[in-house]
Image (cartoon, helix red, strand yellow):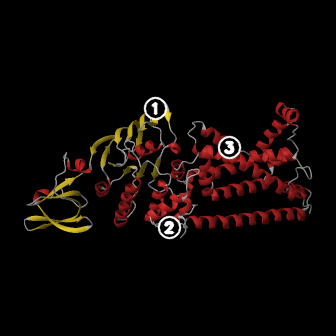
């Protein structure tokens, strides 16, 4: 269980397709919370994760976990990734191809660490039966679960996930989100995940930080960030995605995916130009009429 | 046919390959991952034997190792080593001559691995040493095999360097490729043919075995 806050305050130059941009980020992550990092590609989200893990040394700044300083460029402190209580789930999973599922997990054991944790994690991610298989024989979702289990073997206090669910289909993504929440409840690590998926942010994250052009453009609870309100109302709020729009009499009917179901919504003509397929929105049910609020 | 030159070739190639493997592993690792600016210069030096005529290399080695010159003198007085016209000299020359054939495949193999493998191992608490031996090398089997075979085969096929630095002393420096040359010079085409055929068949067999193993390795990693 993590009861230590994570403080990040760094500056690092990034080479991007748009030229060099300066990543300047200050974030305080409360112990045991789930922080989602989001924003356009190339904005520095992955770099930030790598700086926290110690895979990159920032040009300037500080990464502190409670009283432990992991990186401090002024004091010339740099704690190697091996010595940070951090788990990292890579975008490509980075499973060792020559090892079986079980061996991938036992590889991660610290010297003298009990092997019981391996069985416990294999059970938790429902991979006990596939423990003898090599990664290449597994599906994407199964590989994902191995990567997740492996990252938890050393019981990290901070779990970093780089777009872990992006390559999975919608059903699998939902199941993985459940699994992540379950593991998080069980082990209470602090979690930072990079994601572009709004549904994921709303399902998983306590806090979200939108990073744009190397800066934190917005930070807060998902509701605050995406509805631009300080307090969420008591009304039910549903996340949806526009599938298609058709004219119907005087108004518009939108076919939308809401909570895994395709729904037809009647919306005012005024929204016609903005409601294009692929747009995300929040559906707010008040007593009289449903309200649609566009996000992003 | 005197089998001595063939045994000598086999001993030289095996020894060269083993020594080079030990030298090349750390060098290839360093070259694969260093951010050192002068890396290109080092790579160019290692690659020289690829493009240099073997006689040029052999000539300079002959000068360097010659007991009438400073380095050769030092070798003889300090280490008791005489590297011209000796088997040890052949081994040293072969190691230099075949260096790129060992290093380049290893370096390319290590560089072709996804960087996340190395990083994953680090975040799992494993040192660079453990990562190298337990993650990177086991996933570079194909590159290791290629490097070993190319080095071995290249040493078997050596001629110019061997002749320059080793000469033609039976049982000491007269390897199979030199023996073939001798027999042809003496118009003993039958004997030359026997040596040549043995080298041809052995080389073909080695390569066939290697490609079979390599294909199997690839199938295990990327099943259809």
Identify whether A206 is placed above or below A138: above
Give the side of residue B105 with respect to residue A260, left or right. Answer: right
Q: Which of labels 1 and 2 is toward the front?
A: 2
Q: Residues within 10 Å of mark 1 (few under 14, many from 20)?
A: some
Q: Which residue was labeled with disc 2?
A: A128
Q: CA distance from mark 1 to mark 2?
A: 44 Å
Query: Residue A154's x, y, as percent?
Result: 50, 51
Query: Residue A290's x, y, as percent?
Result: 13, 60
Query: Residue B39's x, y, as percent?
Result: 60, 39
In the image shown, does A278 or A82 lie closer to the viewer?
A82
Q: Which of labels 1 and 3 is toward the front?
A: 1
In the image shown, does B158 or B77 lie closer to the viewer?
B77
**Circle 2 marks a residue in which chain?**
A
Q: Which residue was labeled with disc 3?
A: B46
Q: Residues within 10 Å of mark 2 (few under 14, many from 20)?
A: some
Query: Which residue is found at the position 34% from the left and 67% from the top?
Result: A171
Marks 1 and 3: same chain? no
Q: CA distance from mark 1 to mark 3?
A: 37 Å
**Circle 3 marks a residue in which chain?**
B
Q: CA distance from mark 2 to mark 3?
A: 49 Å
Contact between marks 2 and 3 (CB within 8 A): the answer is no
Residue A268, by quadrant, is bottom left
Q: Please, what secondary structure does the residue beneath circle 2 have?
A: helix
Q: Please, what secondary structure does the residue beneath circle 1 have?
A: loop
Circle on res. A73: 1
């Amino acid at each position: 269980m993590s009861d230590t806050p994570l403080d990040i305050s760094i500056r690092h130059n990034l080479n991007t397709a748009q030229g060099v941009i300066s990543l300047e980020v200050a974030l305080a992550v409360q112990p045991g919370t789930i922080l989602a990092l989001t924003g356009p590609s190339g904005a520095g989200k992955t770099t930030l994760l790598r700086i926290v893990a110690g895979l990159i040394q920032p040009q300037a700044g500080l990464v502190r976990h409670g009283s432990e300083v992991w990186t401090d460029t002024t004091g010339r402190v740099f704690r190697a990734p091996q010595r940070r209580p951090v788990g990292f789930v890579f975008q490509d999973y980075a499973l060792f191809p020559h090892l079986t599922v079980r061996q991938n997990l036992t590889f991660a054991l610290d010297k003298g660490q009990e092997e019981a944790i391996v069985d416990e994690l294999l059970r938790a991610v429902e991979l006990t039966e596939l423990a003898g298989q090599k990664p290449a024989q597994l599906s994407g979702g199964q590989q994902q679960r191995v990567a997740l289990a492996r990252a938890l073997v050393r019981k990290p206090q901070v779990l970093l996930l780089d777009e872990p669910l992006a390559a999975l289909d919608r059903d699998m993504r939902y199941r993985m989100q459940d699994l992540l929440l379950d593991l998080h409840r069980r082990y209470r690590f602090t979690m930072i995940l990079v994601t572009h998926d709004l549904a994921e942010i709303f399902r998983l994250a306590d806090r979200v930080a939108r990073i744009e052009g190397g800066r934190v453009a917005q930070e807060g609870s998902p509701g605050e960030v995406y509805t631009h309100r300080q307090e969420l109302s008591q009304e039910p709020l549903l996340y949806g995605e526009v599938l298609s729009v058709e004219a119907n009499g005087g108004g518009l009917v939108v076919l939308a995916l809401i909570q895994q179901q395709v729904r037809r919504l009647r919306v005012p003509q005024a929204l016609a130009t903005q409601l294009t397929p692929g747009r995300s929105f929040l559906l707010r049910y008040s007593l009289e009429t449903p309200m649609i609020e566009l996000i992003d | 046919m005197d089998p001595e030159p063939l045994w000598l070739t086999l001993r030289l190639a095996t020894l060269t390959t083993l020594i080079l493997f030990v030298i090349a592993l750390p060098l290839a690792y360093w070259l694969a991952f260093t951010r050192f600016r002068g890396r290109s210069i080092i790579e160019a030096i290692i690659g020289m034997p690829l493009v240099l005529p073997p006689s040029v290399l052999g000539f300079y080695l002959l000068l360097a190792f010659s007991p009438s010159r400073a380095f050769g003198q030092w070798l003889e007085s300090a280490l008791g080593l005489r590297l011209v016209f000796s088997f040890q000299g052949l081994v040293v020359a072969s190691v230099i001559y075949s260096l790129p054939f060992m290093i380049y495949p290893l370096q390319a193999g290590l560089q072709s691995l996804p960087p996340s493998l190395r990083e994953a191992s680090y975040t799992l608490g494993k040192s660079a040493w453990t990562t190298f031996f337990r993650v990177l090398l086991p996933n570079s089997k194909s590159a290791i095999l290629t490097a070993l075979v190319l080095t071995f085969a290249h040493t078997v096929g050596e001629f110019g360097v061997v002749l320059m630095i080793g000469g033609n002393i039976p049982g000491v420096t007269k390897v199979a490729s030199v023996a073939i040359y001798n027999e042809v010079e003496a118009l003993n085409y039958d004997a030359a043919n026997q040596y040549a055929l043995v080298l041809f068949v052995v080389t073909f067999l080695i390569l066939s075995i290697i490609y079979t193993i390599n294909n199997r390795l690839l199938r295990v990693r990327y099943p259809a």
